[in-house]
Amino acid sequence: MDDRGAGGGWPDAEPLDSLRRRGILHVDMDAFFVGVEQRERPELRGQMVIVGFPSERSVVLSASYEARAYGVRSAMPMATALRACPRAIVVEPRHTLYYEVSRELMALFGEFTDLVEPLSVDEAFLDVSGAVRRLGPPERIAAAVKAEVRSRLGLTASVGVAATKFVAKIASARSKPDGLLVIRPEETVPYLHSLPVGALWGIGGKTAEVLARLGIHTVEDLAHTPDSTLQRMLGAPGLHAKALSWGIDSRRVTPHREEKSVGAEETFASDVVDDEVLKRELLRLSHRVAARLRAAGLEAGTVALKLRYADFSTLSRSRAVTVPADSAHVLYREGVRLLAGIGPRPQSVRLIGLRGERLSRSGGAVQLSLEPGEDNWRTAEKTIDAVSARFGRSSLRPASLLGEAAERRRPSPPGEPPEPPV
């Protein structure tokens, strides 16, 4: 946006001169999983691509913009997505590869500023206020970030630039795909007030409907609604939304946000009773979780098991490991022990999940394993990581999993709805 002069103040906001000195970028990759797959397989470029498992109960993890034109969205049930876009190419995810690219991405951000706050594998806030003297104004830095992401990673990103995190995130969303939007401090309030009320954090579809019944349709409408009315309708979140409507967001970019857990889960095409099927799925999930831990440079101090029964009731169990681990061998062993500890199950199992918790950085003090083959397992799994990153997750796997794919992809019984996103 062009510099149009002062757009008006807002209550209790930082002085405009102070905001002028702040430059926050929100960098959000465009269809990240799809972009990585298209980089590795150029024949997929320009195609309708969905990343996810081709199972009736699975969900869309990422969709190309060609598929999104047909209404396909992340977290949509796969069955719904394929009805909307039947010619889409479904690609199974390669999480190890995505995490490796994510690490490269975050390292690239770190070359511009040490104030990088990752939000997920494919987006982050960057505070470039301290880099302006060295690299130029924030919009120039944002353009340089985009150019480096394209040239070094072969991917595209959308970037929002503003004086606050909230407005920067709105700007990146409004510039997708492959865009750059700068909202200057003096433009913030006029820009926000031009948006629908649903653009504010915390205003979902149902809340927007409640506000619409009171004639509140835009951010400007909400900004001029009395505090007492908002508090009566929405409680404390209503007052927070009003502060955002005036551009007030004092949160700083926090560079060190550690993941609290790393996990994976699978919904079966048909509910499962057989212990051997559950154990085989646990083995597959153990390899997925362990690969993600190693890609992130983390180890788990606790292993957690999750079961969802046929009636959708959910059970969780966890246990600590003696030494923090990033090995599928250890995760699987503990997962099987947790499964056995549950005893006779009252119902068949619809979903099973495994998580590593109490995470710590790997590479610290090494405690020798009492099992002489433990290092051999870890070495073998690192080899699997390297092969999977290059050729796909299905290219190398334990022998006991060779026949598991077809069983997981059995169609749902007639008339049964797809599994909702979890």
Image (cartoon, grey):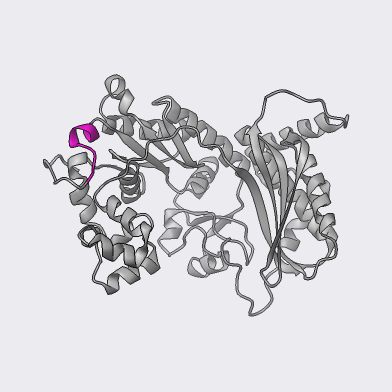
Q: Quadrant of the C terminus?
A: bottom right
User: Which residue corresponds to the image point at 21% horizontal and 40% vertical from the top-left?
Assistant: 185
Q: Front-most of 418 and 226?
A: 226
Query: Is 206 located above or below residue 404 in the figure?
Result: below
**Image quadrant assignment for residue 207:** bottom left
Residue with the most extreme top position: 134
User: Which residue corresponds to the image point at 21% horizontal and 62% vertical from the top-left?
Assistant: 221
User: Which residue corresponds to the image point at 67% horizontal and 72% vertical from the top-left?
Assistant: 412
Is residue 266 left or right of 72 when viewed as pictured? right
Residue 355 appears in the figure? yes
Residue with the most extreme bottom position: 415
Number of marks: 0
Q: Quadrant of the N terminus?
A: top left
The picture places residue 351, in percent across and down from the top left corner, at 69, 62
Query: Is 5 located above or below residue 44 in the figure?
Result: above
Is residue 217 left or right of 285 when viewed as pictured? left
User: Which residue corresponds to the image point at 14% horizontal and 46% vertical from the top-left?
Assistant: 8
The picture places residue 293, in percent across and down from the top left corner, at 65, 38
Is residue 274 left or right of 77 when viewed as pictured? right
Q: Front-most of 11 and 223?
A: 11
Q: The magenta stretch spans which residues?
A: 12-20
Q: Front-most of 160 and 214?
A: 214
**Image quadrant assignment for residue 201:** bottom left
Residue 86 appears in the figure? no
Q: Front-most of 291 and 184?
A: 184
The picture places residue 157, in percent across and down from the top left corner, at 40, 41
Per the image, is 396 magenta? no
The picture places residue 132, in percent across and down from the top left corner, at 28, 24
